[in-house]
Image (cartoon, grey):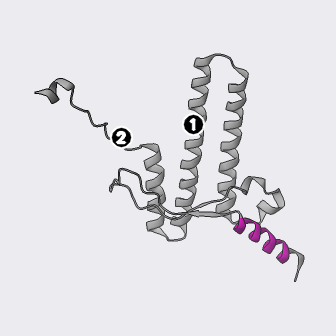
Amino acid sequence: MPLRSLLIIAVMSFVAHSVTIAGPVDAPDDRTDRPEAPTVLAVPNLLTLNEDQAALLSPLLQQVRAALAAQQAETAALEAKIAATSDAQEVRVLERRVAAAKLQGEIRIFEIQAEFARREGRVSEAEAFDGLARSLRNPAPRKPAAVLPSRQEVSR
């Protein structure tokens, strides 16, 4: 077997062992207005691959890896600023920017997955990824907490 084939098998085996599959998660409020979530692949070790290994990834995983790297670089820079500041208000602003960067990274990964699904003719899966990205951009408002009656109202 040629060396390249062995390398491809080794890398794919490595990636396969680092992949966890997560299905749709039901929210506690069981909203039915959400699109059904497709199966999402989470590959936490994509950033630990060297460039030779990364070159063997599928185009989808290469783009996901690039999005993860960009998100990681942005959050690391913001976290360094947090560590360097003593102003509590500035820390809160930077923490919100870190959260926004992480959220934008998740949205970008859903957009990449939707783009590839659409290219491959998996329209319903693309629409589901688009729906997930849209729900992260514009989350549904939370239901207000139930208000308990006051003691005066109960004693009447």
Is residue 15 positioned above or below 111 on the image?
Answer: below
At label 1, the amino acid type is Ala
Query: Which sits in the foreground, 155 or 53?
Result: 155
Looking at this view, is 145 or 69 the one in front? 145
Q: Which residue is mark 2?
A: 142
Residue 42 drawn at (x, y percent)? 62, 58
Q: Is residue 113 above or below residue 82?
A: below
What residue appears at the point 39 percent right and 51 percent down from the top-left corner? 28
Of tags 2 and 1, the one toward the viewer is 2
Q: Residue at x 66, y 56 (%)?
A: 63
Residue at point 62% right, 23% down? 91
Going by the picture, which residue comes out furthest to the front? Answer: 155
Residue at the far top in the pictured view: 87
Q: Secondary structure at mark 2?
A: loop
Which residue bears the numbered disc 1? 99
Q: Quadrant of the N terminus?
A: bottom right
Residue 108 horizontal side relative to residue 148, left or right: right
Residue bounds of the magenta highlight: 5-17
